[in-house]
Structure formats: structure tokens, C-alpha cells
């Protein structure tokens, strides 16, 4: 069989091309690296299994919440804690379970929004009023005032905690704690200028620390104001004294009499007797004022 030289050349060229293509394909298959396509996460919804992995993974990523939504969740937890707290107190006796639920909710509120001072104040109040843990109460109250220097509840609790540590007994008086209480009481007065408890306690601590002029000023402000809303703490720390305008005027009269200011003491004790004319203790102070030389 006769073939032309040109035909043979064409056949040889085709054979070379086919051979080169086969070798190239083989080499490509041998050198191919493992697939770098990310595997689908475990537990994806069935509807996403047929999607490309990157698309499926994107679809199941949780949407991050905004700071506003985070704060809203924190407030919701704060309100939840307040509900548990109110229920625990309104049943006639404190419910341990209710307090624990309240504490848990307040803790979660603080974790959701670390700038929520009220959550720290609520924790401090529970430890102070019901758990008798002054150190924990102090830590929570201090945290509240660090977050918000205008947090009234935090300053009030700190003032009470340091007042208890200081005491009003001269023989066991802790001056350092008293100074801390004075600092917090001043913050209370800054935020609530007519707070009866703050002025009354300031008067006592000023007397115990030798600041008589400041004591008279604080007691005068107390006597000029309204009765305290919550008198329980003052009654406990003072051994039963009242937190009302009559008691304030009588206490002012005692201090003025001690400072040899009988005429001013007479004015103060008369104000007390006008509010409580049958009070035997006030009548006794009146007699002492007259004995000191005050003229009727």
C-alpha cells in the first residue's frame, strides 16, 4: 500500500499530539492537590445540605445583636429580677428560692450590660438586707457607684455599711469607717438634699469626730425637713431613736445645750414639743434648758 510522504507526516503529527495530551492528563491527575473546599459543619439543616458549603455555612451563621438590643435584654433581666424580689418580700416572709431567682436574674442583667449600675445595686441590697453579708454588699454597691457616680442606692448602701462598721458607741468607735460613711453620706445629700437619714447620721458622726459646727448644721437641716421615708435603719443603729422632725428638733436642742447655746436650744425644744407635746423626754430637755439660763 502506497502512502504519500505528506500523509505519513500528518499521521505522525496527530499521533504525537494525542500522546502528549494523554501524558499531560495523566500528570495533571497525579499532581492534583486535595480539595480545599471547606466541609459542611455538622448538624446543618437538611435544606442546606444541597447548597455549596460556603453558602450553607453563611446561611446558618447567627445574626449578631446590636448594643441597643443587648441593653434591652439586660433591662428585661433586671425587671425579671425585680419581680422575683418583690414576690420574695410580699409573701409575708422572705422566700429563699425567690431571692436566689432574683440574684440570678440580676447577675445575668449585669453580664448582658456591664454598665447597668442598677443590677449591681440590687445585688448589694439583697446581700445587705437579707443575707447579712456586708462585705459582698459593699463590693456590689461600690461597683454600682464606679459605674454610675450618681447611683443613689449604691451610695446609700455604702453609707449604711460603713455606719455599721463605725458604730455610734464612743468606746468602740471606728473613726476610719466613720470617715468613709461621712463621704458616702455627703454623696447621698448631694443627690437628695433633704434626705433625713443622711443629715441625721452626718450630725452624729460629726459630733463623734469633733466637728461640732458641721454637726449643728446637719441637725438643723434635718430638723427643717420632712420625716424620713424609711426609718428602720436609723432606729436600729441609734438604738430606737425616731427619724421625724420632732426627734430632729429635740436632738438639735441637746447638742446646742451641750455647746452652751441655751437660747437656741430653747427654740429647738419648743419646736419639738409643738409636734409632740406629751413627750416626756422632750419635757426633760426643756427643764435642762431653763436650768442652763434660758429665759422664757
Image (cartoon, rainbow, N blue to C red):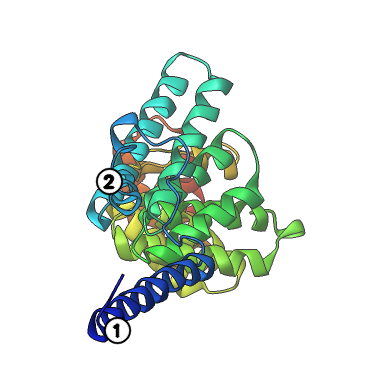
Q: Is residue 287 visible?
A: yes
Asked whether 291 or 244 is in front, the reply is 244
Q: CA distance from mark 2 to mark 1?
A: 59 Å
Q: Which residue is mark 2?
A: 59
Q: Is residue 124 left or right of residue 188?
A: right
Decide: is 254 above or below 228.
below
The residue labelled by disc 1 is: 9
Residue 222 lies in quadrant: bottom left
Name the quadrant containing residue 72: top left
| Residue 148 picture location, percent across and down | 37, 63
The percent position of residue 277, horizontal first and vertical second, equals: 35, 33
What's the mark number on residue 252? none
Q: Residue at (38%, 66%) from the top-left corner? A: 149
Tell me: 67 left or right of 92: left
> Depth check: 206 or 34 in front?
34
246 or 228, which is in the foreground?
A: 228
Exactly how many numbered labels are in the figure? 2
Q: Nearer the viewer, mark 2 or mark 1?
A: 1
- In terms of secondary structure, where does tag 2 sit? helix
Percent position of residue 217, x then y: 38, 68
Amino acid at each position: 500500500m502506497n502512502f504519500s510522504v505528506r500523509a505519513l507526516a500528518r499521521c505522525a503529527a496527530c499521533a504525537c499530539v494525542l500522546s502528549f495530551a494523554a501524558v499531560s492528563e495523566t500528570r495533571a491527575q497525579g499532581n492534583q492537590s486535595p480539595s480545599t473546599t471547606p466541609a459542611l459543619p455538622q448538624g446543618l439543616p437538611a435544606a442546606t445540605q444541597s447548597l455549596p458549603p460556603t453558602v450553607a455555612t453563611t446561611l446558618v451563621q447567627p445574626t449578631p445583636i446590636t448594643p441597643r438590643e443587648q441593653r434591652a435584654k439586660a433591662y428585661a433581666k433586671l425587671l425579671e429580677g425585680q419581680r422575683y424580689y418583690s414576690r420574695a418580700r410580699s409573701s409575708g416572709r422572705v422566700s429563699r428560692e425567690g431571692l436566689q431567682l432574683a440574684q440570678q436574674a440580676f447577675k445575668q442583667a449585669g453580664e448582658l450590660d456591664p454598665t447597668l449600675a442598677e443590677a449591681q445595686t440590687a445585688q448589694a441590697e439583697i446581700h445587705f438586707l437579707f443575707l447579712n453579708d456586708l462585705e459582698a454588699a459593699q463590693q456590689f454597691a461600690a461597683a454600682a457607684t464606679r459605674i454610675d457616680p450618681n447611683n443613689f442606692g449604691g451610695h446609700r448602701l455604702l453609707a449604711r455599711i460603713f455606719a455599721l462598721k463605725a458604730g455610734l458607741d464612743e468606746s468602740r468607735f471606728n473613726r476610719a469607717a466613720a470617715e468613709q460613711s461621712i463621704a458616702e453620706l455627703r454623696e447621698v445629700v448631694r443627690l437628695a438634699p433633704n434626705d433625713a437619714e443622711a443629715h441625721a447620721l452626718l450630725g452624729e458622726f460629726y459630733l463623734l469626730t469633733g466637728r461640732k459646727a458641721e454637726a449643728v448644721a446637719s441637725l438643723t437641716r434635718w430638723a427643717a425637713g420632712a420625716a424620713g421615708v424609711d426609718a428602720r435603719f436609723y432606729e436600729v443603729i441609734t438604738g430606737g431613736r425616731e427619724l421625724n422632725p420632732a426627734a430632729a428638733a429635740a436632738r438639735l436642742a441637746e447638742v446646742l445645750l451641750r455647746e452652751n447655746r441655751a437660747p437656741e436650744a430653747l427654740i429647738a425644744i419648743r419646736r419639738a414639743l409643738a409636734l409632740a407635746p406629751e413627750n416626756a423626754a422632750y419635757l426633760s430637755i426643756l427643764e435642762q434648758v431653763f436650768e442652763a439660763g434660758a429665759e422664757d
